[in-house]
Image (cartoon, rainbow, N blue to C red):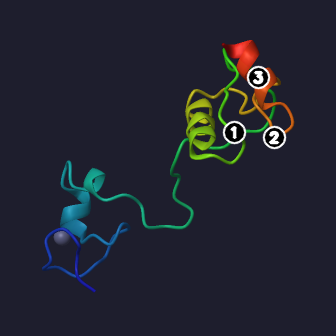
Amino acid sequence: MICRHCHRAPISRPRRLCWSCYYRPGVRELYPSTSKFGRRGVGNFYGTRPLPAFPTNAAPGSPEKIEVLAERAQLKLNLWHPDDATHATPALAVAKAG
Ligand SMILES: [Zn+2]
């Protein structure tokens, strides 16, 4: 296998880079880790976090709700607000948020 940056030297460093590309400033940042242990995404945590400022009207499982959850995770907030819309109480959540 050859280096994915210079396409000349054999791979000898992580991220499928050769030695000189891996240690050349700026090159390593262009190629994210290929390791299954590499840290990616917004991270993970366990415990209680502050509640989000507002509940969401997005239906459970909808792309909008997933977008809201991703935003909350990025802000390190609790993923779930007690007044979020559910399948059982979609109208209640709309009335509270509206
Ligand atoms: Zn290289």
- Relative to 70, 21 lies left or right: left
Q: Position of residue 93 (x, y in %)?
A: 76, 22
Residue, disc 2: 87
Crowding near pointer 1: few (<14 within 10 Å), some, many (20+)? some
Q: Tell me which residue sits at (15%, 77%) in the image.
A: 7
Q: Position of residue 15 (x, y in %)?
A: 36, 66
Q: Relative to the observer, which residue lies in front, 51 or 16?
A: 51
Closer to the camera, 62 or 32?
62
Where disc 3 sits, the SS reads helix
Of mark 3 and mark 1, the one earlier in the sequence is 1
Task: Relative to 86, say whether 36 is above or below.
Answer: below
Tell me the distance, in whole angstroms, between the alpha carbons under discs 2 and 3. Answer: 10 Å
What residue did someone put label 3 on? 93
Residue 92 higher or lower than 26, as above or below: above
- Tag 1: amino acid: Ala
Do the residues under discs 2 and 1 have CB atoms within 8 angstroms? Answer: yes
Q: Earlier in the sequence, mark 2 or mark 1?
A: 1
The spot of residue 31 in percent (x, y) is: 30, 59
Few, some or many residues within 10 Å of mark 3 (<14, 14–19, 20+): some
Residue farthest right in this picture: 88
- Secondary structure at badge 1 equals loop
Check the image and name the residue furthest to the front: 91
Q: Quadrant of residue 98?
A: top right
What residue is at 24 percent from the left and 72 percent from the top?
Answer: 18
Question: Residue drawn 23% across and 75% down?
Answer: 3
Q: Quadrant of ligand 1?
A: bottom left
From the viewer's perspective, is 57 left or right of 63?
A: right
**Is 47 situated left or right of 52 in this image?**
right
Residue, x 13% and y 71% (percent of image)?
6
**Quadrant of res 85:** top right
C-alpha gap between disc 3 and disc 1: 10 Å
